[in-house]
Amino acid sequence: MTALEQLSLYLAYPFVVNALLVGALVALCSSLLGTTLVMKRLSYIGDGLSHVAFGAYAVAAVAGITRDLLVIAPVTVIAAVLLLRRGQSSKVKGDAAIAMMSVAALAAGYLLMNVFGARSNISGDVCTTLFGSTSILTLTVFDVALCAVLSVAVVGGFALLYNRIFAVTFDEGFARASGLPVDRCNLIVAAMIALVIVVGMSLVGALLLSALVVFPALAAMRVCRTFKGVTILAGIIGVSCAIAGMAVSILASTPVGSTIVLMDAGVFALLCLVGKLRGRVLKDGR
């Protein structure tokens, strides 16, 4: 049986289709928002919020809350808002505030799961949450519906605020002088990326999730020169790598999160080469 025949056989199962759908939606939202975060030099916020989400997951797990997303989502969104607002006005600035919150949440989450965790396989739970697992293949109808709703909200919000996001991304000072609500726009973007991180934890895990935010945007920037072009290409790269990575993971029985991240890294390396070759051709043509 060829790989295509085997993959078509797997696609007959609804849980595989659900996993591919959720993976594509998470990758699309991550890529769109990643373009703004990378250009604003805030890509590290994705890593910080994913650690906060892990801490919230640990609290939910210790408390025995089955619908852990109902705990993780509001905590991560609040953390995103605090990071941006406090990072701009407090004595602890930007990346320092993110690093402090990230490490503290990660340490607190691991401590809670070890001291108060009722399950015997604590190390397995921690590894699954941090690096992802095959749980993406056991999504419930509630999980798929929630991901779809959040994805529509994120993509719709990005489309509606596209002009404001564009202005704030490239020249925040000019946007503020023009009367645009810069702080409100930044907070909305932070809330959207927090929601994406919450949903994406089941796909690639807390530690690898920031790769979905950073790699597609950086790869698109190697060959595109406009914000719109980078955004569109980043979305295409993110969705394609997520679907291809999950397909390879299913066929080869490899970890889902690691496979997707390596796909993104491979495309980034390829487009870096393409960008260099194109630059040389243009230089020689002159």
Image (cartoon, rainbow, N blue to C red):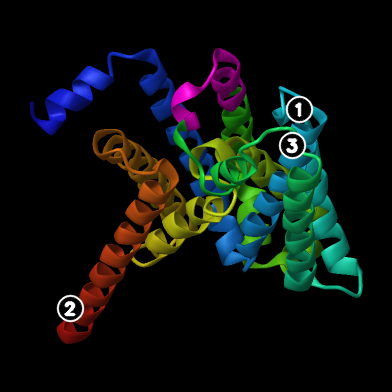
Q: Say which element carries label 2.
A: helix
- Report the front residue among 28 and 95: 95
Residue 56, quarter of the rendered image: top right
Q: Which residues are magenta?
A: 135-148
Q: Is residue 186 visible?
A: no
Q: CA distance from mark 3 to mark 1?
A: 6 Å
Q: Amino acid at mark 1?
A: Leu
The reply to whether the magenta stretch includes residue 144 is yes
Instruction: Between label 1 and label 2, give the one nearer the viewer.
Output: 1
Other-residue count near label 3 (Cα within 10 Å), few / some / many at <14 / 14–19 / ≥20: many
Q: Marks 1 and 2, Cα distance to the nearest angstrom?
A: 53 Å
Residue 102 is situated, as x and y percent measured from the top left of the image, at 73, 60
Instruction: Judge by depth and name the residue closer to the eye, 44 or 253.
Output: 253
Between residue 270 and residue 282, name the one nearer to us: 270
Residue at (53, 41) in percent of width and height: 29
The residue under label 2 is which amino acid type?
Val
Report, in whole angstroms, how far the alpha carbon at label 3 lies from the one at label 2. 49 Å
Of the 4 image quadrants, the one containing the N terminus is top left
The residue sitting at the left extreme is: 1
Does the image show residue 45?
Answer: yes
Is 216 left or right of 177, judged from the image as shown? left
Say which element carries label 1: helix
- Disc 3 target residue: 72
Task: Please give the name of the residue rendered at 37% of the width and 22% of the height, measured from the top-left corner.
Answer: 16
Q: Secondary structure at mark 3?
A: helix
Q: Is residue 112 magenta?
A: no
Left or right: 99 with respect to 223? right
Amino acid beneath label 3:
Ile
Q: Which residue is mark 2?
A: 281
- Residue 188: give x, y in percent of width and height: 74, 45
Are discs 3 and 1 less than 8 Å apart at CB? yes
Name the mark on residue 70.
Answer: 1
